[in-house]
Image (cartoon, rainbow, N blue to C red):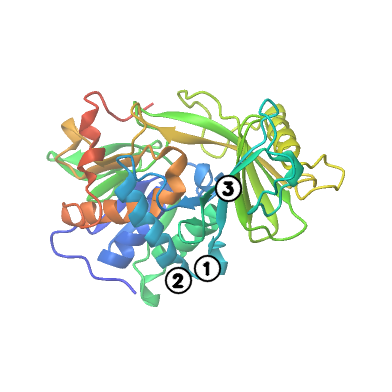
């Protein structure tokens, strides 16, 4: 069910980027304010880059010490609300546990005869130390691509079916368009002007001059049963394993250094040696050799790579674009690093409220993420 837009709110918003931030914003503009969006993405698809290739790990309190703590807690709550609304099975949402396991061969082993408790699927003789990182009250997971697709399904519900009729367009927004010093649309690379009265740039590491990307590779491995414990290994390169409810395990680690991203969305090169390194590390850490003697011994069904967007201070960049854009309803939301899926719903909710009302909502103070903290921020129009 959607609301009706107020007289002063934008009637049509162009969203550049169909990842979790852009799609979440479109969802909340539709459901909370009745505002239609046109989402423009270079691939013409939802979640073609990091939002479709991430692990979907969700933690309630891991960011309590940081400026994103408030945003993380609100978003963790919204993930549960979305699971209730969209259907947990439809987005593979569930609660689970998480542990840190030390498998560093340089460490002395645990005391002889001492049994480690709480290990679900790792061969115990591979582990020196085990530490719980959370249980079902603080840890959850979601399938990022399924989440984005289901959010978009609601946002794009046609008007004759009770929705706002948001649309998805293949293309790239290069700049705002003005008429009489007032925003009138979004200019695309083919010089088409999409009429609108607000623009949100949610392009991840692309199209904003201050942004960089950190490239991660990942593999998805079938498991012989459904596992329910995410594991962060300490040692052997510190790989991470996020089991999913469809009897697969998402495995990642060994990120590249942050860089200016030149590969385009959906066209990220997968380096075979990087994928093999992850596979070898998680197998060695878990006690599997690939000879059907462990839960991670199967061959991967998916190998992939993506870039996680990062600002110079590693905090999200959310709010009005400063300088010449600030009086023209041009907004930005990016820079959520490795927490993009966790922070996506609350970021979308917050940006939708800011775009529709001009104010922060009661849950998240966006001022700490103000783009104006970077005096030279601007759009890359090439």
Quarter occupied by the C terminus? top left
Could you give the CA–CA distance between mark 1 and mark 3, rounded to whole angstroms? 23 Å
Which is nearer the N-term, disc 3 or disc 2?
2
Could you tell me residue 239's position as x and y percent?
62, 36
Callouts 2 and 1 close, C-beta under 8 Å: yes
Which is nearer the N-term, disc 1 or disc 3?
1
Q: State which quadrant residue 157 falls in.
A: bottom left
Q: Is residue 102 above or below residue 148?
A: above
Q: Residues within 10 Å of mark 3 (few under 14, many from 20)?
A: some
The secondary element bearing badge 3 is classed as strand
Nearest the viewer among 163 and 348 is 348
* Residue lying farthest to the right in this orientation: 291
Residue bearing the label numbered 2: 84
Residue bearing the label numbered 1: 88
Tell me which residue sits at (48%, 36%) in the image: 308
Q: Disc 3 or disc 2, which is closer to the eye? A: 3
Residue bearing the label numbered 3: 99
Horizontally, residue 122 falls left or right of residue 202, namely: right
The secondary element bearing badge 2 is classed as helix
Nearest the viewer among 70 and 366 is 70
């Amino acid at each position: 069910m959607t609301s009706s837009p107020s007289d002063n709110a934008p009637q049509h918003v162009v969203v550049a980027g169909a990842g979790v931030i852009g799609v979440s914003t479109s969802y909340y503009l539709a459901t909370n304010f009745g505002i239609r969006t046109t989402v423009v993405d270079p691939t013409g698809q939802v979640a073609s880059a990091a939002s479709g290739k991430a692990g979907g790990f969700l933690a309630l309190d891991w960011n309590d010490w940081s400026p994103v703590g408030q945003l993380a807690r609100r978003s963790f709550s919204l993930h549960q609300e979305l699971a209730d609304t969209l259907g947990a099975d439809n987005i593979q949402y569930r609660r689970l546990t998480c542990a840190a396991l030390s498998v560093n061969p340089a460490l002395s082993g645990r005391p002889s005869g001492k049994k480690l408790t709480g290990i679900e699927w790792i061969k115990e003789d591979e582990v020196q130390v085990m530490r719980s990182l959370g249980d079902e009250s603080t840890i959850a997971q979601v399938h990022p691509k399924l989440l984005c697709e289901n959010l978009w399904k609601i946002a794009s519900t046609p008007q004759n079916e009770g929705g706002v009729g948001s649309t998805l367009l293949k293309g790239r927004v290069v700049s705002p368009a003005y008429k009489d010093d007032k925003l009138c649309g979004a200019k695309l690379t083919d010089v088409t002007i999409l009429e609108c009265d607000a623009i949100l740039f949610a392009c991840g590491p692309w199209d904003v001059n201050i942004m960089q990307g950190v490239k991660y590779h990942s593999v998805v491995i079938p498991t012989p049963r459904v596992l329910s414990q995410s594991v962060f290994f300490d040692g052997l390169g510190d790989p991470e394993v996020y089991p999913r409810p469809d009897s697969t395990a998402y495995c990642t680690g060994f990120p590249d250094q942050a860089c200016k991203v030149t590969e385009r969305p959906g066209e990220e090169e997968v380096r075979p040696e990087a994928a093999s390194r992850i596979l070898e590390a998680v197998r060695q850490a878990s006690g599997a050799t690939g000879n059907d003697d462990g839960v991670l011994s199967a061959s991967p069904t998916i190998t992939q790579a993506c870039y996680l967007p990062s600002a110079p201070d590693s905090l999200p960049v959310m709010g009005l674009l400063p300088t010449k854009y600030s009086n023209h309803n041009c907004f930005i939301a990016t820079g959520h690093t490795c927490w993009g899926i966790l922070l996506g719903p609350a970021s979308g909710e917050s940006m939708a409220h800011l775009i529709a009302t001009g104010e922060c909502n009661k849950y998240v103070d966006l001022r700490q993420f103000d783009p104006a903290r970077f005096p030279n921020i601007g759009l890359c129009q090439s």
